[in-house]
Every structure is written in C-alpha cells, then in structure tokens.
Image (tube, grey):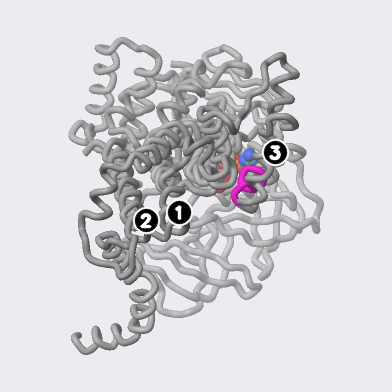
Amino acid sequence: MRYQNATAYRFLAPYLLIFSIFWLWPIIGSFLISFQATRTVPWRFAPTFNWGRLIGDPAFFNALKNTLLILVIQVPVMITLAIVMAVLLNSPLLKARGLFRFAFFAPVVVGEVAYSAVFRLMFNLDYGIINKLLNSVGLPRIDWFSNVTPAMAVIIIAVTWRWAGYNAIILLAGLQSIPQDVYEAATLDRVSKLKQFFYITLPLLKPIIVFCAVLSIIGTMQLFTEPFLITERGGPGGGTETLGLLLYRQGFRSLNFGYASAIAYTMAGLAIAISLVQLWLTRDPK
Amino acid sequence: MAAVTLKNVVKRFGGFQIIHGADIDVNDGEFVVFVGPSGCGKSTLLRMIAGLEDISGGEIAIGGKVVNDVEPADRGIAMVFQSYALYPHMSVEQNLSFGLRMNGNPKADTERRVKRASEILRIAELMKRRPRQLSGGQRQRVAIGRAIVREPQVFLFDEPLSNLDAELRVQMRVEISRLHKELGVTMIYVTHDQTEAMTLADRIVVLRDGYVEQIGRPLDLYSDPDNQFVAGFVGSPKMNFIKARVLGHSASGVTVELAGGTRLTQPLNGPVPEPGSKVVVGVRPEHFGHAGKGDADLSVTIDVVEHLGGTSFLYTRTAAGDDIVIQRDAAEVPDAPEITVSIRKSYLFDDNGRRLR
Ligand SMILES: Nc1ncnc2c1ncn2[C@@H]1O[C@H](COP(=O)(O)OP(=O)(O)OP(=O)(O)O)[C@@H](O)[C@H]1O
Ligand SMILES: [Mg+2]
C-alpha cells in the first residue's frame, strides 16, 4: 500500500512540480509581497505599510464603493434577464432556437477591445446611436462619459450585455433537465403557467441560479476591461474606478507591488465572503 | 364517477396518423386496460383523454359531456405517470396537497383529503420525506396518492408499474385492484404487459398500430380471440401458430392439412375458405394432450424442457420446422426426444390473420 502510494506520487511529481512553481508559489509569493514596503528598493518587511495604508486610503474606498455598487445593481439585473432569456429560449414556440442560442452566446466571443470601442461609439455624445434615439423620441442628449452616474450606467449596461447570454445558456441547460411530465402533472393539478414558473421552475433551477450568481460576483469583483476601455481608466475623475483598475494603477503604473498585492487579496477575500453569504442565504433548509 | 366514451378518435402528429378512429366505451366504475405492443399508441390515447394531447378527429366524452375543448384540469380526471412525475423539491405531503393549495381549496378540506389518501396508500410515515428519499414502490404510491387527493371521476394510469421490480409489481398490482374496489371509480390503465392486463381488467382493449383489434373481458379474449394478433398477444407462453392448407369441407366442418401432413377437422359457421387456400392453425400450449386423445396427432422433437415446478414447458419442433411450445404436468415429461401429442383444441385463422369460426 505504502509502496503503491509512493509510486503514485512519483507519477504525479512532474505535475505537482509545475503546479507549485506556476500556481502555488505566485499565490504565496504575492501574499508575502503584500507585507513588504515596495515603494523604494530594497524592499523591506513592514506588515502595516500596505495594509495600514489600505484601511485609510480614500482611493481604495472609492474603488470599493464603485465595485460594490456595480455588483449590487448589475448581478441581480443580469441574472433576472438571463432567466427570462433562458425561459424564452426553452419555449417550444420559439423558431430557429440554434440561431438565438448562438446570438446570445456571441458577446462572450467578441474581442474585448472591439466590443469596448463599439460601446464608446454607441454612447458618443454627438454621433452615438443612443443619443440619436433619445433625441428622436424627444428626450435630451446625455453626456454619458462626463458624468459619474451615466458613466456607471454605461458600464453596467455593457457588462450585462456581455454576460447575460452566457448565463442564459447555463440556465437553459438547467431548464432542460427539468422533466416535462412534472409540468404536465401541474397542468392536471390546475396550476397556471405563471405559478408553475414560480413554484416549480424557480425552485428546481435554484442551484444553477446560485452557481451563476457566484460566478458573476467573482467576475464583477475583478471588473477591469469596461472601466479601463469604455470609461477611459475609471473616468470621469475616478468616478468609475474599480478595485481591479486601482490594482492595475498601483501595480503596473506606480510599480507599487506590495500595495497592489494587498488590494488583490482584499478583492479575493471579498469575493469569497460575498459568495459564502450568498450560498448561506440560499441554502436548502435542512 | 363517470363513463368515458371515445367516438372515432383520430390522432395525427404532423403528417403521421397514429390513432386510426378508435371507438371505445368505458362504463362508469369499470376498470379498462389498454394493452398492445410498444408504439401502438396507448399512451397517446390516454393523454388525449387527459387533455395533454389535442384530438385531431372524433370525440371524447367524460360523464356524458364532450371534452374535446375542455381544459385538462376541468375534465375530472387524474393521471399517474410512468415516471411518477413527482415534484422533486417538495415533501410527500406537499406533493399531495400542491394542486389543492394552488387553487385555494379550504385548508381543512385539503388536510382531510391528504390524510385519507395517505391512509388508503399507507404512506402516513413518509409524509415529510422528499421523493428522492423514497423507494420506487413508495414513489409510485405517492403518485397514486396525488391522484386520489384530486378525487377524480376517472383515474388514468400510464404503465405505472413498469419501473418496479417483478415482486413489487405483483404487490402493487394487487393494491391497485384493491384501490379500484375501494373507490369504485372508473379507471383506465395502460400497459404493454398482458399479464397485468389479464389480472387487473374488467375489460381489455387490445391495440395494434393505432387500431383497436378487440375489446372484451380477459377470459373472452383468451378463449375467443377475433384475430391472430389478439390470440398471440393474450396468454403466456404465446399461442402456437402452425401453417396449414385447406383440403375441403364436409358436414362436420372444414378439414385442413398441417405442414407435416397431420389432418384436422374443425366445425365452421361462417363462410368456408377455398380448398387449397392457406390458413393458420393456432393451439395454446395447454391444449396439447396425450397421443390419440384429441382432434389430431402431431409428432414433434423436444429441444429444451423448462421446469417451473408443477408444470413444465416443452420447447419442440415439428418435422416441417414449426416451433411448438407444449405445456405438461411435471410428472408427465417424457424421456424420449421424440413424442407424439394430440391437439385438443385449436383456432383457425385465414391468411390475413382473421379468425375463421
Ligand atoms: N409528440 C410526438 N410526435 C410525433 N410522434 C409521436 C409523438 N408522440 C408519440 N408519437 C408516435 O406515436 C406512436 C405511439 O406512441 P405512444 O407513446 O402512444 O406509444 P405507446 O403505445 O404508449 O408505446 P410504449 O409502450 O412504448 O409506451 C409512436 O409511433 C410514436 O413514435
Ligand atoms: Mg407509452
């Protein structure tokens, strides 16, 4: 038995080695870096240097506030939208299902830079199609990128557009695993389609919804592309700066790796904590 | 309680016609079994009665009222599905009461009905469990309980026992019989298992490829089948079919010659087939006797003997190559590989499988 274990570990050794070098070590290493003062060379060990700065840094709290605000609005809106899309996709009345499925999934495949450029164009003050549409129904134009609230809205819309279809496809798989005869039994029980949705579909889909929510929370906690490319590095004036962007600014513009690491661990910790709370809130009774 | 009447009922899926004008009368309080091979349209017919499939032609009436355009929930039926179709996220109790709760039924009445169903089916101790914590037999009981709670005029069962093992199947069969006696309501039951049909039914409807082949009481179908299909479908082991040729007829009936040269004379009331035309002689395994004690003798070679205890089945072959199964008392199984048996009772079918009588 012992001998067999040893053999197994010898076979695993190459993998474990690479895993340790490229995965385990960076994780541990970056955690250690967060305890070092890295503003000046040589780096020195100073546990409170970064973490102490973090808890009093207005830039950090601004980024945290922005990230959480986007999270609180975007994730529920997107998940709700994804559920509606999945139910429509699953409807037997729908023709050309394959086409729609592809169309919903396509945003994920489109390059980030291209998609961001298109969004910037669409929301452009003078030529953007959105403002043209607003004008055509008699509403005033909005200067999307010069004010914080509209800029936040653009980011939320963009992220939702990009990921709602992806979640809808995952939810669709869940919907299709609910057996049809359960709905037939409910029909015989005189349960309306709407009640079937709330009393049968939603409860049976709950594990998948929670899965999608957790994935989205983790994704949004790390939000970077949209505020970087669409609102031009968290503009206007840091109004849409997220934790991911702050991390980038500290790590790769100021080359302050210690502080960037501390931010990164805060982001990961928050994502885990929020996900755990989410799992706990939606746990199965008993 | 209600009678169910099907008049010239037709079902088409797209261009395919699946049910070809079914006429079936189910009396009030009767237990009727639809039986037939896989794909013959039993489930489709049942689902049309339930309202889960629409009716392409003809008329279905429940309790004297045409229900073609009546919502499933308003037809006074309850259905038990082959896959149980329990709500997986609800306890047994919630499964039973769901429909009533969703429709604002008074709480006291809902509780009374659930309690009664749980007593009838003896599932009172399972009420707090989820379906996945139940055995197949228990799930089946809950599914039946959910039907009972609706207090329907007609119960519909679609192969309710096919997911159970053999022993449990027998046990549940008895329970369903008992339930029918206790409730006294009309029940329509679909199965492809002729044993289930024979043991449960007041009357059996035999279906094939969307046509009703024969309707009758179990023993009538057994002893007086209308055609070769029904004769072969009812009874286990199957009736033996031996090819034969009409020789001629006399006052005592028609005389046919089996492939091996054996001659058999049968009385006939209907029109007599032409001499020389092909016919099929059907003999049930239990209708073979000792040589010289029947209408004709047949020599066969024994292949395999199956001992079931009291009786045995001899799997044999005639010189002409017809496979014949013979039932014998265990004590009378011969040692020799070749035996001669007599045909004590036989049925005659024409070339199209129609019964000649
Ligand atoms: N929704 C459908 N669309 C097209 N054809 C169908 C549909 N449902 C059933 N059929 C066809 O109708 C025929 C009868 O089907 P049905 O399910 O009623 O058979 P069954 O007698 O219940 O068979 P089994 O014993 O296998 O359950 C089959 O040939 C089947 O392929
Ligand atoms: Mg079926």
Q: Does the beta carbon at disc 2 come under 8 Å from ligand 1?
A: no
Q: Nearer the viewer, residue B106 or B70?
A: B106
The residue shown at (52%, 14%) is B63
Residue beneath label 1, please?
Answer: A248
Q: Is residue A132 above or below residue B235?
A: above
- Pointer 3 indicates a residue of which chain? A
Label 3: element kind: helix
Chain letter of mark 1 equals A
The amino acid pointed to by label 2 is Ala
| Image location of residue A205, percent across then percent down | 43, 38
Seen in the image, is B130 located left or right of residue A201? left
Which residue, as the protein is rendered here, is positioned at the far top?
Answer: B106
N-term mark: 1 or 2: 1
Residue A121: numbered disc: 3
Residue shown at 44%/61% (left/top)?
Answer: B327
Residue at the disc numbered 2: A260
* Quarter holding ligand 1: top right
Which of label 3 and label 1 is nearer to you?
1
Do the residues under discs 1 and 2 have CB atoms within 8 angstroms? yes
Q: Share a chain, discs 1 and 2?
A: yes
Task: Tell me which numbered mark, 2 or 3, is placed earlier along the sequence.
Answer: 3
Residue A212 visible in the picture: yes
Part of the protein shown in magenta = A102-108
Q: Is residue A107 covered in magenta? A: yes
Q: Is residue A276 magenta?
A: no
Q: Secondary structure at mark 2?
A: helix
Q: Which amino acid type corresponds to the residue marked 1 in the rendered image?
A: Tyr
Q: Residues within 10 Å of mark 1 (few under 14, many from 20)?
A: many
Q: Is residue B245 left or right of residue B97?
A: right
Q: CA distance from mark 1 to mark 2?
A: 7 Å
User: What type of secondary structure mainly makes up the magenta span?
Assistant: helix
Q: Are marks 2 and 3 in contact (CB under 8 Å)?
A: no
